[in-house]
Amino acid sequence: DAGESSDERSSSCDECEAGRAKGAGPGECEECTKGSYAEKGASECSNADPGYFVESDGASRQEQCPAGSHASGSGNTACAPCQAGKFASNKGMADCVRARRGHYVDAEGATKDTACEPGEYAFGEGFSGCLAANAGYFVDEKGADHQTRCNPGEFSAAAASDECSKCPVGTFSSEGSPSCTPCDAGESSAAGSDSCEECEAGRAK
């Protein structure tokens, strides 16, 4: 029968040992090759499932890929580490998962993604690093997927800012400004202004 071997000098059939298999008919049990396995008495070797691997000949079982790696397709002899921008938090993963929006993975073999710090953001999935907020913008929380313009009357001069500052007295700014603009002669403004006003009669700047 399938899964049994016979000796030409004997009428008895013996079950194939684990790691070996044979179909119906006379003959010997054959050893399973790398990427496949067989339990005792199997009629054929089975390919390793996606997310599993078999690294040696004559295996009786398949092994799960460790967290941080994956094995796509069947019959794998080894698992591959997740590339930067992806991760595998569980064992036995057929495919790695892309880093979430507002998160990143900067190295191979990761088991989780990491939230972007304030001042940085990641607008899509699968980022290997976060983007710094532009001058004139800010990001005030971890795990952000976008940057925000500074309000009128405020500014951020440096990249990767987590807040905007008010324009000083005698200056103004519009939305998303990297700097404040001085008022013209004969005009003034309070701190945090989005425009300047003419000085009253009898007053000078």
Image (cartoon, grey):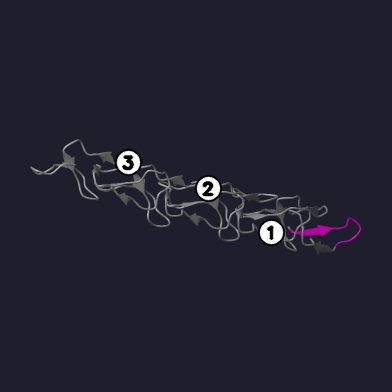
Residue at 66% of width from left, 54% of height from top?
48
Front position in the image: 134 or 41: 134
Quadrant location of the N terminus in the rendered image: bottom right
Q: Which residues are magenta?
A: 3-11
User: How far separated are the C-alphas under marks 3 and 1?
Assistant: 62 Å
Give the secondary structure at mark 3.
loop
In terms of secondary structure, where does tag 2 sit? Answer: loop
Q: Locate residue 149 relative to residue 26 in the image: left or right.
A: left
Residue 114 image position (x, y, % from top left): 50, 56
Q: CA distance from mark 2 to mark 3?
A: 34 Å
Q: Which badge, 3 or 1, comes first in the chain's sequence?
A: 1
Between discs 1 and 2, the one toward the N terminus = 1
Label 2 sits on residue: 85
**Number of other residues with Cα within 10 Å of mark 3, as a class: few under 14, some 14 to 19, many 20 or more:** many
Question: Does the magenta-highlighted stretch encompass residue 96?
Answer: no
Query: Tag 1: residue type?
Result: Gln
Mark 2: few/some/many CA within 10 Å (<14, 14-19, 20+): many
Q: Which mark is residue 62?
A: 1
User: In this view, which residue lies farthest toward the top?
Assistant: 185
**Residue at the disc numbered 3:** 179
Image coords of residue 172 (percent x, y): 24, 43
Report if residue 9 lies within the magenta region: yes
Give the mark nearer the N terminus: 2 vs 3: 2
Which mark lies nearer to you, 2 or 3?
3
Amino acid beneath label 3: Ser
Compute the Cα span from label 1 to label 2. Answer: 28 Å
Along the viewing direction, whichever of 139 and 13 lies nearer the viewer: 139
Residue 89 pos. (x, y %): 55, 59
Looking at the image, the residue that sits furthest to the left is 201
- The residue at 24%/50% (across/down) is 192
